[in-house]
Image: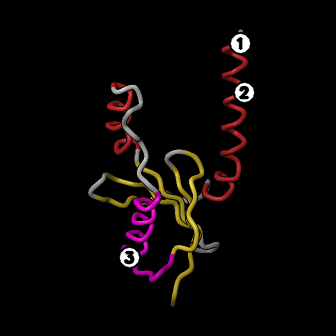
Amino acid sequence: MRSIVTGLACLSLVGCAAGPVMETYGSISKQVVETDGGDFWVFDRPDIGKILTTPSPGTIAGPAFVSGLTLQAVKLDPVIAAHQAVARAWFAKTGRKCEIKTSFEIWRPEYEHTYTCRP
C-alpha cells in the first residue's frame, strides 16, 4: 500500500512540474539537432525567446543502460554547456544570430534557455 501512495505522490509531483513546460512547449513541434554526442530534440519559442533542449530517447538509452549496470556510477545527462551548444547549433541551423542569456535544468535531462537574437 505504501508503494502505491508513494507512486501516486511522485506522479502528482511530475505532473505539477510538467504543467508549465507543457503550457510553454506543448504545441511546438520537436526539431532535431545532430551532435557528436547523439541527437538532441529542441523546442524553440522565438516569440518569447525560449528554447528547450533534451537528448533524444535513443541518445540517452545507451548511457541509461550502462548506468543501470554500473549502479548509477555513470552520469546520464550532459552538462549545461553541452545543452547550450545544442541551442547554439539550432540557432546556426536556422540562420539566426542569438545569444543565450540564462540556462537552467527543468528536470534531468531537459534544460531551458532564454535568449535574444540580433536582426
Amino acid type, residue under disc 1 in the picture: Arg
Q: Secondary structure at mark 2?
A: helix
So how many labels did they put on this image? 3
User: Which residue position holds label 2?
Assistant: 9
Q: Which mark is residue 92?
A: 3
Amino acid type, residue under disc 2 in the picture: Ala
Query: From mark 1 to mark 2, how far is it between C-alphas?
Result: 11 Å
Q: Give the residue drawn at x 43%, y 46%.
A: 77
Principal SS element in the magenta part? helix
Q: Counting residues from the N terminus, which is met first, the one under dot 1 or under dot 2?
A: 1
Residue 33 placed where, x, y %? 36, 61
Q: Which mark is residue 2?
A: 1
Q: Give the residue drawn at x 32%, y 31%.
A: 66
Q: Counting residues from the N terminus, which is met first, the one under dot 3 or under dot 2?
A: 2
Q: Verify CB contact (< 8 Å) between mark 3 and mark 2.
A: no
Residue 102 placed where, x, y %? 58, 68
